Image: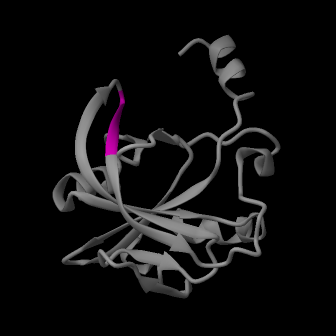
Amino acid sequence: MEKVWQDVFDRFTYGIYLVTISTDEGPNGMIASWLTQCSHEPPRLALAIRKNRLSHAQILETKKFCVNVLPKDLAHTIKNFKIAEWKKKFNEAGHSLSPHGLPVLDKCIGYLDCLLEYTIDAGDHRLFIGAIAAGGMKNPGKTKALSTLDYEGVYRGSA
């Protein structure tokens, strides 16, 4: 990508979310910022994940994922979900399981369980379209969600 284009993209504002997956080997979670609602009826989300990520393969395998909306005061917690040893990501994160058996952080604002409906190839990423199957508020008093603005306006996932 041309640097000037990346400079423009760096000015976009995104939420920072924790996307969780549950496999036979255990739970996994990844930080995602390219996520948006894409339909009211039926309610759907679109999530972009780089194709070389473990979470990408796990969502294709399990056909479901959960989006945890993180409060701004959990900015320090996300580093726990960037470690290489994915089976240890939830060691220090209090959580319960959603109706579809996916990890939900105890301190998240709310969550949405999504069942994978289809995918779209999008270059080095794949777009996952998920139908919202369950969800709810965990901490409705926390109203300020974590965003790229909490990273001085720039959050880049590494290649």
Q: Give the percent coordinates (x, y) of residue 64.
A: 27, 60
3 with respect to 87 (left or right)? right
118 with respect to 29 (left or right)? left
Q: Give the percent coordinates (x, y) of residue 142.
A: 76, 71
**Quarter of the figure with residue 40:** top left
Establish if 49 lies above or below 58.
Answer: above
Q: Residue at x 40, y 71 (%)?
A: 85
Q: Nearer the viewer, residue 29 or 116?
A: 116
How many numbered badges does the structure rendering display?
0
105 with respect to 58 (left or right)? right
Q: Is residue 19 visible?
A: yes
Q: Give the percent coordinates (x, y) of residue 103.
A: 41, 77
Q: Residue at x 78, y 39 (%)?
A: 153
Q: Is residue 83 visible?
A: no
Q: Give the percent coordinates (x, y) of residue 90.
A: 47, 81
Q: Residue at x 55, y 88 (%)?
A: 94
Q: Nearer the viewer, residue 41 or 52?
A: 41
Magenta region includes residue 128 = yes
**Quarter of the figure with residue 58:** bottom left
48 with respect to 25 (left or right)? right
Magenta residues span 124-129
Q: Residue at x 58, y 69 (%)?
A: 110
| Majority secondary structure in the magenta region | strand
